[in-house]
Image (cartoon, grey):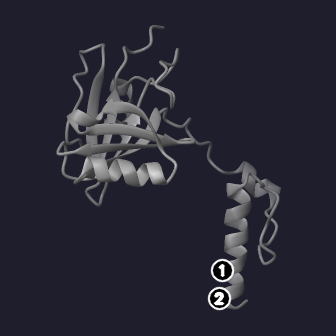
Amino acid sequence: MNPISTLASACTLAFALGAGLTSVVPQDTPPQNPASQDSKPKEAPAMQLGNFSVSLAVKDIKASKAFYEALGFTKVGGVLEQNWLVLQNGTTTVGLFQGMFEKNMLTFNPGWDREKNTLKEFQDVRELQSALKEKGLSFVIEADLASTGPASFMLADPDGNPILFDQHVDKPRH
């Protein structure tokens, strides 16, 4: 198969998966043996990281606000006079922060849904930190494991991109 056909097959599969279709298989993919699927190790349940957003370190918050509003984002939080805003467009959340940190970062908010409603059940930030430590990850900032209220920790991916886990609510009571 030539490279263009391979790329077209991959794009078709990616589009189908993104659209929620799972029955599209590229023509050159051999059928899978059902017996081999049973031999795969069981995956551990996914970590509950919380609501996701991208936090952008912006140079001019007013210009950034205008730009993202032109893309259809609307303000759902923040204070322009304090140089921070939270904007949403559908299920996408972008935080704009002027002068608060140096790099853009990924942010997870354990305990919140995308509308900042507190979830009844969620994985507490301290549980997440402990689980990630067990996996050998190192931290830039750590949460106090003895605390029970809002807390946060930060790590960096292999390229130095900061990832903030920022819990604003008390941990769930079991």
Query: How many residues crowd mark 2 within 10 Å: few (<14), some (14–19), many (20+)?
Result: few
Q: Amino acid at mark 1?
A: Leu
| Left or right, 87 with reference to 2 | left
On the question of residue 112 being in view, the answer is yes
**Disc 1, SS:** helix
On the question of residue 137 being in view, the answer is no
Q: Nearer the viewer, residue 169 or 35?
A: 169
Q: Nearer the viewer, residue 157 or 31?
A: 157
9, above or below 41, in the image: below
| Left or right, 132 with reference to 145 | right
Res. 147 image quadrant: top left
Q: Which numbered disc covers residue 27?
A: none
Which residue is the extreme one toward the top? 174
Residue indicated by mark 2: 3
Q: Which numbered disc covers residue 7?
A: 1
Q: Quadrant of the N terminus?
A: bottom right
Q: Amino acid at mark 2?
A: Pro
75, above or below 106, in the image: above
| Image coordinates for residue 13, horizontal then vertical, percent | 72, 66
84, above or below 118, in the image: below
**Residue lying at 24% horizontally and 27% vertically, measured from the top left:** 143
| Left or right, 162 with reference to 5 | left
| Image coordinates for residue 11, horizontal then vertical, percent | 67, 72
Res. 149 image quadrant: top left
**Disc 2, SS:** helix
| Image coordinates for residue 114, horizontal then vertical, percent | 51, 31
C-alpha span from label 2 to label 1: 6 Å
